[in-house]
Image: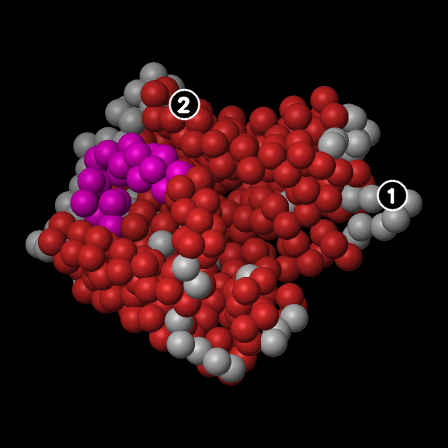
Amino acid sequence: MVPLENALGMTRAQSSLGFSLMLLTEGLLAFFIGRWIDRGHERFIMTSGSLLVGALLLVHSVISTQAQFYAVWTLLGVAMACTLYPPAFAVLTRRFPNHFRRAIIILSFLGGLASTVFIPLIAWLMDAIDWRETMWVIAAMQFLVCAPIHFYLLCGAKSIPHTQAKTDGGSDNELSRTVSNSVEPHLSIWQFMRNPVFWQLSCFVVLLMAATSALPAHMVSLLRESGMGETWAIAVPAGIGVIQVVGRLGLYLLEKRIDVHTSNRWVTLLIPLGLLSLIMGHGEVLGCLVFVLLYGLGNGMLTIVKGTVMAEYVSKAHMGSLNGILGVPMAVARAAAPLLMGLMWSPSDGYTYGLWMLLIVSVIGVGALWSAQNNAQKI
């Protein structure tokens, strides 16, 4: 951000606006992208999305004004809507209808290493060459790696059968039969939206998105206020990415040993438990470390749960569209939560009130998921 701001004469708020525009655009397009993937156009969507990312990064390397910067980042939102986790999860659900959850765990396990690899790589490139030339390298990765993978591997789009013997994970209980009967592709998406389970799951996804999006921007400051030294206050949040990967690995190893619905129910509790440990620890270092461990494990596994609940409890065939409907609410939650957290900070009480807000929000979200599971059993 710093070299970009220096080159274009922008403040931190002005450069951050570009990221917000990208998130908003991605959210606005999420439903339409998901809808097209549900109709079998995943190859075109993800290949063209990768090509668009590469082209926009090349354009980004020659921009000279703020207006050009905002235009590029707005269009990057279009490309992100075609290439990030939501479309990828929808594709995996279509390609592996009986094992989609396991496929998503593997993908997100590898995806969790992205920041671990690319933050230091790009920092090294920017030291070795200019930030503009660094854009060329990243663009080349899109053209030479991502686009060919999408083009060759996503040929021959398949449709999900009208009936499934059982859900991913092999459970034969009543909930599994209910879910398997709900994935009828010939039903309209609007019929699924009238299902109260859809709205309860929507509440869960959006509220947990807000709870987990609020903290990263404030994590270093929060740990500093707890009394951690400067080195640890920076190193501990950086380690959350690794802890998230460990959580996903654990979920992968236990996938066939624990009922998927039980797993969904208890994994989500790690986020509120982590927040509670931070509040009850009164800013002590031990409480912060317990929080980071629970938050990292919970957030890593929560990505899997949020990405699969619509397919598990509402519809596999319409997963892309149903998740896409939540695109804008999730974008708003991601953008508003860190701001609200900052507004609730005070010199005397620090982040106390903000943490209580996040705890309440996360408990309500977990309760919505549990209620959705109960209602799915009764349908």
- The image quadrant that residue 301 belongs to is top left
Q: Residue furthest right?
A: 348
Q: Say which of 121 and 297 sits in front.
A: 121
> Could you tell me residue 38's position as x and y percent?
24, 58
- The image quadrant that residue 355 belongs to is top right
**The N terminus - image quarter:** bottom right
Image point (78%, 26%), residue name? 284
Image vertical order of residue 19 relative to residue 89, above or below: below
Q: Is residue 65 left or right of residue 84?
A: right
Q: Is residue 238 left or right of residue 283?
A: left
Image vertical order of residue 320 relative to residue 74, above or below: above
Q: Residue furthest left?
A: 156
Q: Say which of 200 and 59 sits in front.
A: 59
Q: Is residue 359 left or right of residue 88?
A: right
For the residues labelled 2 and 1, say whether their Cβ atoms are less than 8 Å apart: no
Q: Which residue is mark 1?
A: 349
Mark 2 or mark 1: name the one nearer the start of the chain. Answer: 2
Q: Say which of 365 and 299 sits in front.
A: 299
Q: Say which of 17 and 145 sits in front.
A: 145
Q: Is residue 223 left or right of residue 62?
A: right
User: Any magenta on residue 108?
Assistant: yes
Q: Main secondary structure of the magenta part?
A: helix
Range drawn in magenta: 91-113
Which amino acid type is shown beneath numbered disc 1? Asp
Image vertical order of residue 15 relative to residue 274, above or below: below
Q: Secondary structure at mark 2?
A: helix
> Could you tell me residue 3's position as x and y percent?
54, 65
Image point (49%, 63%), residue name? 23
Q: Which residue is mark 2?
A: 250
- The image quadrant that residue 77 belongs to is bottom left
